[in-house]
Image (cartoon, grey):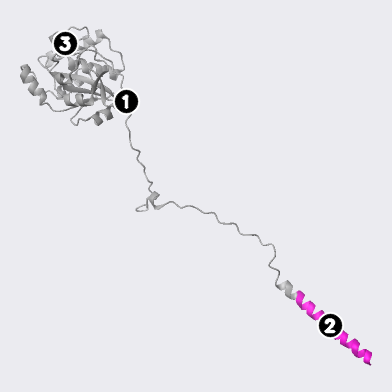
Amino acid sequence: MEKNKKLYFFLIIFLLVIGIFSGWLALKEKHPSQETNIPSLTKPEIVSLPTIENVIIPENNQSQEKISIPVETLPEAVDLPVPFTSQAPFYNWDELHNEACEEAALIMAKYFILGKNLDKETAENEILAAVNWQEKNWGGHFDLSAEKIIELGKNFFDIEKITLDKEVNPQKIKNYLSQGKIIIAPCFGRNLKNPYFKTPGPIYHALVIRGYKKNNFITNDPGTKRGEKFIYSEENLLESIHDWQGEFGRYYSKEEAVNLIEQGEKVIIVIEK
């Protein structure tokens, strides 16, 4: 009897152990371990958004772009290939050739536009033909104001793109030259102080500005056989630019002409191909 009690006791203990162990296994299946291999999350990529300075908010649902305007800078130097002629190609400084600077300037402009060379014979023939045309159409060969130079350029030399500009300063002249345009400048010739002019120099004079370098202008000055690429300082040339103010076709004494030209307006004639 005593033996049966002990056996019964151990059986109960065994069943309790079995029950506890079974309950632990069931609980483990419902709550798996935190060491289970779970894929790790990748670090999100940081995207840099444009700053407010680089964004233009569109108006009326229209897309817009920020426009950056580059600052224009002029070339350090310009020298356009303008063929040269003196107003006296064969050095015959008679009355006709002494007054032919306007014609010579237009001839140089014409052959620049054509892209042709200019020899002495061609230049002389062009000068004589232009003077002859003026005598027939204008009744004589006179000093030409800037407006009359333009008229002669259009009507005789067939230069189409020739205009007058009354705003004269070094920067504007350089802008024209950097665009491939050349300038005819009417001047008070004596003020130019060109050492190759016969003293005291011409009262009214016209020359071609073909380029610049630093604070100097490169010119084709028809008043001397040494006038090709002749250099004038900005200050000298700008002070000398004056339009002819005399009445067209009327002759003046030298004193009267000097007074008129010194009062002349500052203008330039712009020519492009």
Could you say where residue 83 lies in the image, as x and y percent from the top left? 28, 15
Where residue 4 sits, quadrant-wise, is bottom right
Which quadrant of the figure contains the C terminus?
A: top left
Count the numbered circles shown: 3
Boundaries of the magenta span: 1-25
Give me the C-alpha separation between circle 3 and circle 2: 141 Å
Q: Earlier in the sequence, mark 1 or mark 3?
A: 1
Residue type highlighted by circle 1: Ala
Q: Residues within 10 Å of mark 1 (few under 14, many from 20)?
A: some
Q: Secondary structure at mark 2?
A: helix
Q: Which residue is mark 3?
A: 97
Query: Residue at (18%, 16%) from the top-left corner?
Result: 101
First in residue order: circle 1 vs circle 2: 2
Q: Please state which amino acid type lies under the numbered disc 2.
A: Leu
Label 3 element class: helix
Q: Nearer the viewer, residue 64 or 54?
A: 54
Q: Is 181 located above or below residue 121 in the figure?
A: below
Q: CA distance from mark 1 to mark 2?
A: 111 Å
Q: Which residue is mark 2?
A: 15
Which residue is under mark 1? 77
240 lies left or right of 251: right
- Give the foreground label among 1 and 3: 1
Name the residue furthest bottom: 1
Label whose residue precedes the other's in the sequence (3 or 2): 2
Question: Left or right: 146 with respect to 111?
Answer: left
Q: Position of residue 38 (x, y in %)?
A: 67, 62
Can residue 159 be seen in this snapshot? no
The answer to whether residue 248 is above or below residue 27 is above
Between label 1 and label 2, give the one nearer the viewer. 1
**Residue 100 in sight here:** yes
